[in-house]
Image (spheres, helix red, strand yellow):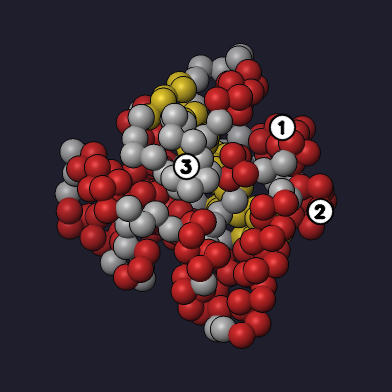
Amino acid sequence: MDKYITDYWKKNMNDIIRWIRVHDIEHILACKYIFANMVQIYEDIYKNELQYLLKYINMDEINNLTKDHAENEKYNPVHMLYAIKQYENNTGMSIKDIKSIVEYGGGYGCMARLIKKINPDVRYTIIDLPIMTDIQREYLKGYDVNFVSLDKIESFKGRYEMFLSTWAFTECTNELYDFIISKKFYNAKKFLIAYLLTYDLSKKLEKEFEDKDKIITEVISIRYFKNRYSEDNLNRFLFI
């Protein structure tokens, strides 16, 4: 498993484990290592994304989808919903019609919870670090979601209609990227891969889909995670 984890996430993983030893996992969003990496906190981004969503979804529906999320993550469900609506608008397909999804890098579970609210019958699996699958199980109590930790990934076999990943491809090792390619993205035919913050990675992914109809959308937005990425980065979406 070690070859599949970047040094940055090895450190984060150890910090999260130490935090959980002295705190309740139920309050994981109070963990600074989770909050700093997985929660959208900028009000200006929230306002821009909400303005986009309101062109297609009324506020009552947005509130219904996000009402049981914690106060300190209140911008994050809108951030995830924004990626979903970008997918739908760029492909003409609806998340409600997807039968199965594999999500690589599920964060603390925000995207999975949203999609299960939109489409309760979808078969949903998250692939992630072992400590993150523990956190996701807690956060997603009451939702029918499957979890595969990276230490089990080489024996995991599955077929899914959609492959979904937000942020995570920017933070995976080349070995993990190549492994997922070798699995043909778990036979997925539909893709939502969002926030590809390196040009080389977006072009490398684009090459994988040369024989498919594809849309690469470069969304010039307020800079995400300003302390970690240079200011000339674009936030790239790949939709199929």
Up the image or down, 50 lies above or below 188; here it is below
Q: Which of marks 2 and 3 is nearer the N terminus?
A: 2
State the separation of the CA atoms marked 3 and 1: 21 Å
Q: Residue 98 carries which label?
A: 3
Disc 3 residue type (three-letter): Ile
Q: Which residue sits at x=27%, y=53%?
A: 43
Q: Which of 10 and 66 is in front in this view?
A: 10
Disc 2 residue type (three-letter): Met
Q: How crowded is mark 2: few (under 14 residues within 10 Å), some or many (20 or more)?
A: few
Residue 50 visible in the displayed image = no
Q: Which of marks 1 and 2 is nearer the N terminus?
A: 2
For residue 133, which quarter of the picture? bottom right
Q: Nearer the viewer, residue 218 or 156?
A: 218
Q: Dot 1 corresponds to which residue?
A: 181
Q: Which of marks 3 and 1 is nearer the N terminus?
A: 3
Location of residue 55 in the rendering, given as x and y in whole percent from the top left corner: 18, 38
The kind of secondary structure element at disc 2 is loop
Q: Dot 2 corresponds to which residue?
A: 1
Left/right placement of residue 151 relative to residue 237 reads right
